[in-house]
Structures are given as structure tokens and as C-alpha cells.
Image: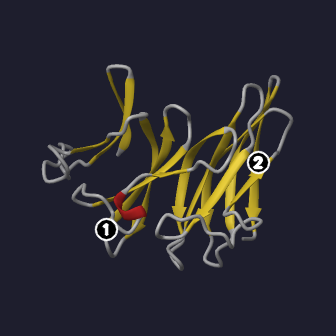
Amino acid sequence: MAGSLREANLFHGFFARYDEAGALDTQYGENGFVLVENDIGSSIEALAMRSVESETVLGVGTTAVPNRGLLIGKNMDGSADLELAGGNIVISDFTAEENAWLQAAVSPASGRIVAVGFTEGFEEADVLIARYLPTGSLDNSFGEGGGWVRTKIGKSVDMGQGLSVQPDEKIIVCGTTFTNDLTEAFVLRYIG
């Protein structure tokens, strides 16, 4: 599982693992927990299995100030996944606006990572989707050469909240769009 813990005035993302009896697995990290400690704070919103063979997991979420989407890889013992950015946090700093990742998926065919979320604005937000190589670098073959795509659905707040990578590498994104008092769901398909 994953989430965030507050320490003083800073949030830290965390990973936790439980055993079959429902108790914290003390073989994982430090007494069952691994904190994502940095100077700007973080939260982990979702987990995705990165590789069943190597037993690695991917955490996706947001840094605190400024809000930027983040990816972080962990091995099943809680140590850093060195294949992903050398074990460091991957921060999405490619948009002028703040942004957040809410979900990620890994392509079984290529190992490429897809993250979905939104750009943040005061009264407006758009769906944001990025594709990364297994190393954590943006995949420049996705979108218009930058590795990411911003999609406006409605006139107000649009959020990508779930996704799936199909066997042919096409990407399905679902989410919600909010306009005044109306909330609607959407499904998008990205060709790649």
C-alpha cells in the first residue's frame, strides 16, 4: 500500500507492505515502511506493478511545493529500483503549470511507463498523460515528440484518473470533467 504521512509541516509519501495475516511485514523496509523523504514533500497516490519477474513496484503521486507529478520505483524489499532513474525520484517538470499524477500503468510488452493525471490551475485543469522509458526518461516517440500530451475535455476541470495500456501499446484513459454543477465521465484512447 502507499500514501502520505505528515511530519511537522511536510508530507512524505510512503510505501508499506503487510503479510498474509494482515500485520506489517518487518522484512520490508524499516519495520514494514519505506518513507519517500525529500526537501519538498510528497504523496503517493497509486501503485503499479512494474515487473513481476524482478518484483518491482512503481509509486505515482505528487511533490508538495510546487506540485509536480512524481514516479518512484521500489524493489520488493523496499530498496530503490535502480533501473528507474538510478533509484531517484522522477519529477514531471515539463509543464509551466503545476501538475499531479493519479495513476500509472506499465506496458507488459515494452516496459514503458504511462502516467495520467492533470495540470493544476485556479479554475481550469486539463488531462495530462506522459509516457516514460523503463529508465524514467520521457519517451520522445509519444505525443508530439516531447513524451507527453495535454488534453482539454471541458471548459473547467478535467482529470485523468485511470488508465490501461493495451497489448498493442494503445492507451485508454478514463476520468471526470467538472463544469459548474455538472460532473461527467469520459474515456479517451491514445494511439501512441
The residue labelled by disc 2 is 186
Question: Residue visible at 68% across and 46% down?
Answer: 95
The residue labelled by disc 1 is 55
Question: Residue visible at 48% across and 38% down?
Answer: 63
User: x%, y% of residue 160?
Assistant: 67, 47
Q: What is the basis of the colouring in this image?
A: secondary structure
Between the C-alphas of marks 2 and 1, the distance is 33 Å
Name the amino acid type tagged 2. Phe
For label 2, count other residues whose C-alpha is less than 10 Å away and answer few (under 14), some (14-19) or many (20+).
Answer: few
Q: Observer-nearest residue: 172 or 64?
A: 64
User: x%, y% of residue 190?
Assistant: 74, 64
User: x%, y% of residue 134?
Assistant: 48, 70
Name the amino acid type tagged 1. Glu
Tag 2 secondary structure: strand
Question: Residue visible at 80% across and 23% down?
Answer: 181
**Relative to 191, does residue 185 appear above or below in the rendering?**
above
- Residue sitting at the far top: 8
The quarter of the displayed image where residue 133 is located: bottom right
State the quadrant of the C terminus: bottom right
Tag 1 secondary structure: loop
User: x%, y% of residue 87?
Assistant: 35, 59
**Does residue 58 appear left or right of residue 163 in this picture?**
left
Q: Observer-nearest residue: 178 or 11?
A: 11
Question: Residue visible at 61% across and 69% down?
Answer: 139
**Does residue 190 appear left or right of residue 21 in this picture?**
right
**Relative to 11, does residue 15 appear above or below in the rendering?**
below
**Relative to 51, does residue 168 appear above or below in the rendering?**
below
Instruction: Mark 2 or mark 1: name the one nearer the start of the chain.
Output: 1
